[in-house]
């Protein structure tokens, strides 16, 4: 039996939280900030390091490129590689300035970057976008960041060709971890000498360990592209710092490694923690301090007696969302993250543009029923919303930490009711923020709710349209209808909120015609301006989804080979009844690319494919016909009234006509409405009564009752009058 007293932590030594290469360049990946924030609540010292950023900054510097070119000169080069090498002095001369510009420093260098001949150019510039189309209204700064991004990609290509075949800014050695049933490929790669990138990684890691002297190094593996580097980190720590314990976890582990049996993985780590890391890490710390026996560990893999074992003491329950603490950004190089730019897809541009603070509104998904989703896993299945006051408190605290007012809510799907209450609280506290996140396009997102979200700072939403077939939507168990999807996107767009859609093709039993029908609906939605961004992806069966759990119910047959002890998530399968979707991907992507640019709407769908496709069965005006939705007063009687507009005052009295002026002070202009004197006084009192600071509910039915009691006239003509429609336009919402 393992004697846990053999290694007792020093309570003053910190836990070192590590994000390995490579995740994202523009903002820290949130997992370690969450864990540090939680450890703060338990007074456990912790420090964090984003090696994903620091390795990039070390390599892509004048010193790093000098070493790269000195090393690469020994390798045979392609035509493109020879060009990059020939321009090496120019790359070394310009790299520090380009990085500074992408970090938000030295903004005036945009003028130089946009000048022909300033940046050395290789293969990536051969596919340069039409920058006049893309940036005509966006300005020089975005154009410069786009050109600088191509410049970095040229260097990345050179690095990959010469010194590190696995290199990639966000998908480093991804192929080694994606659905790797066997550990053999990783083992072979890890037996090789350290790569050029690895040497920078372990140098920086060693510096952090020497500086902080941790007892535990906790490494997150959010994606397959982090797995190789995470293992290199663990390997280095275990070899050079044998007294330090290594723990790993993260999104990749949670989905891919739940059936782990290969003992070789534990040559690189001591423990593997699953699902939310707060409680497993806390128990591990307590165990290593001698406070908890090994039997008290939670959702933890380890090796005992030559076998992989799993310990999960469920008696301790879960950490409530209100107790996980505020994400802690301290110790991160917040002013050194890099904002690159992708032009093709507006949502991808938003993702990479700006230093978004990451927060969660709720644990899990409030719907959690989609048949393609990992609904059996804890991060989806267990739904627990945060209190609204807690959410907005955290918004304010994170803003104070980072100096940034931009937030990306990383929920699987943000609950509409919670969004409504959060938006109201943001407005009540007079906070200036911008935010975006994932939603379901459900009917709860009315026009008025979308306007409220916009007023609170919402700039974009993303959600799954998936398919334009009611049959397949029902099979997916999306919980929405196609008309609802169309109307909801319309509401968001009319409110000035950008809409990104996830589009799926090849779901089990989906026919080719159904996919083409989806493409036609997408074409119409872009043409009508309902969506501005999208991405087609091929359906992938996962082991933890309802489809993966019961493939026979979806007329599919699993074809994957036997599991070999390491990773399992993506499941190879054969669709027994669906269409041939293998050839459709390029045509779907090409059409979408053009629709996002606002062109190609008049082309028949057949033009995007080099083989015969069925004609769409969707009527040519289908989307337009579904857009209009007018709720009656009867439908809205129990909705609450909110005035989110500006100051309201009574203006001059028009004695001869028995009217008064109601003045709405809008941030753009003042609006004067002439109304009957009694109605003017009435509406002035009501609007001051239903401001966002007033907590007492006041419903539309209350307004109807009070109007008819005070004015002694039928309510409906008043409600639909030109004046009331103007008041609604300027900020009177039904929620």
Image: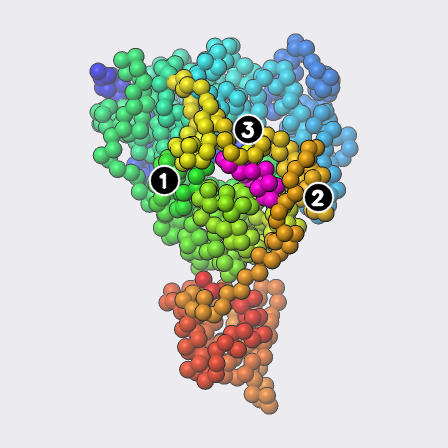
Residue at image point 62% right, 19% down: 159
Label 2 with label 1: CB-CB less than 8 Å: no
Relative to 664, is 222 above or below? above
Q: State left or right for residue 439 relative to residue 346.
A: left
Relative to 651, is 566 above or below? above
**Residue 17 appears in the rendering:** no
**Residue 690, quarter of picture:** bottom left
**Residue 129 appears in the rendering:** yes
Q: State left or right for residue 298 relative to residue 155.
A: left
Please report whichever mark, 3 or 2, sits nearer to the chain's N-terminal start: 3
Closer to us: 484 or 695? 484
Q: Describe the element under mark 2 as helix, strand or loop.
A: loop
Q: Position of residue 178 (x, y in %)?
A: 49, 24
In the image, which disc is placed on residue 381?
Answer: 1
**Category of crowding for the residue at label 3, using alpha-carbon neighbours closer than 10 angstroms: few (below 14), some (14–19), many (at least 20):** some
Residue at image point 36% right, 47% down: 385
Q: Nearer the viewer, mark 1 or mark 3?
A: 1
Numbered range of the magenta stretch = 503-518
Please report whichever mark, 2 or 1, sits nearer to the chain's N-terminal start: 1
Disc 2 target residue: 604
Q: Is residue 504 magenta?
A: yes
In the image, which disc is placed on residue 170?
Answer: 3
Q: Describe the element under mark 1 as helix, strand or loop.
A: helix
Q: Position of residue 243 (x, y in %)?
A: 33, 16
Q: Position of residue 652 (x, y in %)?
A: 57, 82
Closer to us: 505 or 636? 505
């Amino acid at each position: 039996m393992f004697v846990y007293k053999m290694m007792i932590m020093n309570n003053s030594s910190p836990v070192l939280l590590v994000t390995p290469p490579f995740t994202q360049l523009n903002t820290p990946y949130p997992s370690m900030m969450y864990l540090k924030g939680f450890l703060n609540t338990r007074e456990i010292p912790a420090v964090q390091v984003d090696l994903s950023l620091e390795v990039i900054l070390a390599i892509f510097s004048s010193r790093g490129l000098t070493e790269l070119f000195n090393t690469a000169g020994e390798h045979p080069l392609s035509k493109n590689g020879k060009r990059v090498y020939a321009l090496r002095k120019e790359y070394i001369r310009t790299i520090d300035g380009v990085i500074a510009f992408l970090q938000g420093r030295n903004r005036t260098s945009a003028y130089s970057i946009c000048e022909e001949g300033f940046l050395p150019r290789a293969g990536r510039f051969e596919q340069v976008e039409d920058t006049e189309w893309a940036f005509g209204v966006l300005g020089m700064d975005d154009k410069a960041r786009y050109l600088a991004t191509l410049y970095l990609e040229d260097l990345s290509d050179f690095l990959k060709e010469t010194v590190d075949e696995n290199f990639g800014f966000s998908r480093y050695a991804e192929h080694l971890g994606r659905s790797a049933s066997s550990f053999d490929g990783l083992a072979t790669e890890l037996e090789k000498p350290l790569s050029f990138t690895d040497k920078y990684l372990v140098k920086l890691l060693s510096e952090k360990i020497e500086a902080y002297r941790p007892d535990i190094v906790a490494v997150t593996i959010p994606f397959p592209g982090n797995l190789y580097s995470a293992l290199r980190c663990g390997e280095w720590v275990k070899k050079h710092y044998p007294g330090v314990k290594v723990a790993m976890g993260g999104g990749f582990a949670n989905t891919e490694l739940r059936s782990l049996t290969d003992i070789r993985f534990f040559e690189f780590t001591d423990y593997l923690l699953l699902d939310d890391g707060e409680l497993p890490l806390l128990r591990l710390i307590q165990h290593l301090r001698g406070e908890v026996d090994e039997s008290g560990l939670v959702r933890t893999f380890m090796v005992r007696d030559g076998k992989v074992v799993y310990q999960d003491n469920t008696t301790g329950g879960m950490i409530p969302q209100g107790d996980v603490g505020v994400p802690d950004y301290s110790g991160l190089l917040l002013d050194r993250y890099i904002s690159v730019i992708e032009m093709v897809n507006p949502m991808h541009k938003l993702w990479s543009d700006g230093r978004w603070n990451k927060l969660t509104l709720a644990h899990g998904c409030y719907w959690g029923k989609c048949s393609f989703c990992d609904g059996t896993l804890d991060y989806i299945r267990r739904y627990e919303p945060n209190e609204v006051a807690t959410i907005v408190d955290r918004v304010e605290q994170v803003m104070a930490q980072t100096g940034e007012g931009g937030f990306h809510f990383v929920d699987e799907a943000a609950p509409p009711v919670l969004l409504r209450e959060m938006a109201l609280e943001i407005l009540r506290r007079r906070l200036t923020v911008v935010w975006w996140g994932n939603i379901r396009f459900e009917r709860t997102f009315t026009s008025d709710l979308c306007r409220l979200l916009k007023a609170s700072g919402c700039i974009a939403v993303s959600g799954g349209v998936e398919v334009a077939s009611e049959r397949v939507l029902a099979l997916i168990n999306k919980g929405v209808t196609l008309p609802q999807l169309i109307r909801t996107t319309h509401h968001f767009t009319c409110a000035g909120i950008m809409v990104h859609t996830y589009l799926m093709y090849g779901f089990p039993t989906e026919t080719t015609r159904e996919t083409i029908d989806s493409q036609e609906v997408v074409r119409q939605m872009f043409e009508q301006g309902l969506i501005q961004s999208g991405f087609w992806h091929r359906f992938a069966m996962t082991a933890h989804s309802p489809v993966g759990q019961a493939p026979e119910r979806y007329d599919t047959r699993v074809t994957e080979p036997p599991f070999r002890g390491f990773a399992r998530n993506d499941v190879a399968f054969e669709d027994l009844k669906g269409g041939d979707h293998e050839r459709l991907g390029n045509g779907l992507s090409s059409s979408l690319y053009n629709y996002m640019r606002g062109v190609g709407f008049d082309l028949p769908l057949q033009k995007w494919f080099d083989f015969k496709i069925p004609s769409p069965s969707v009527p040519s005006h289908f989307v337009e016909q579904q857009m209009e939705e007018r709720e009656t007063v009867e439908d809205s009687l129990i909705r609450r009234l909110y005035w989110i507009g500006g100051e309201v005052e009574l203006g001059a009295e028009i004695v001869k006509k028995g009217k008064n002026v109601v003045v709405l002070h809008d941030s753009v202009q003042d609006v004067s409405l002439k109304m009957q004197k009694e109605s003017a006084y009435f509406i002035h009192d009501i609007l001051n009564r239903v401001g966002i600071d007033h907590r007492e509910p006041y419903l539309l039915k209350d307004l109807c009752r009070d109007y008819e009691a005070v004015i002694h006239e039928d309510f409906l003509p008043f409600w639909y009058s030109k004046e009331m429609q103007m008041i609604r336009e300027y900020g009177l919402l039904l929620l």
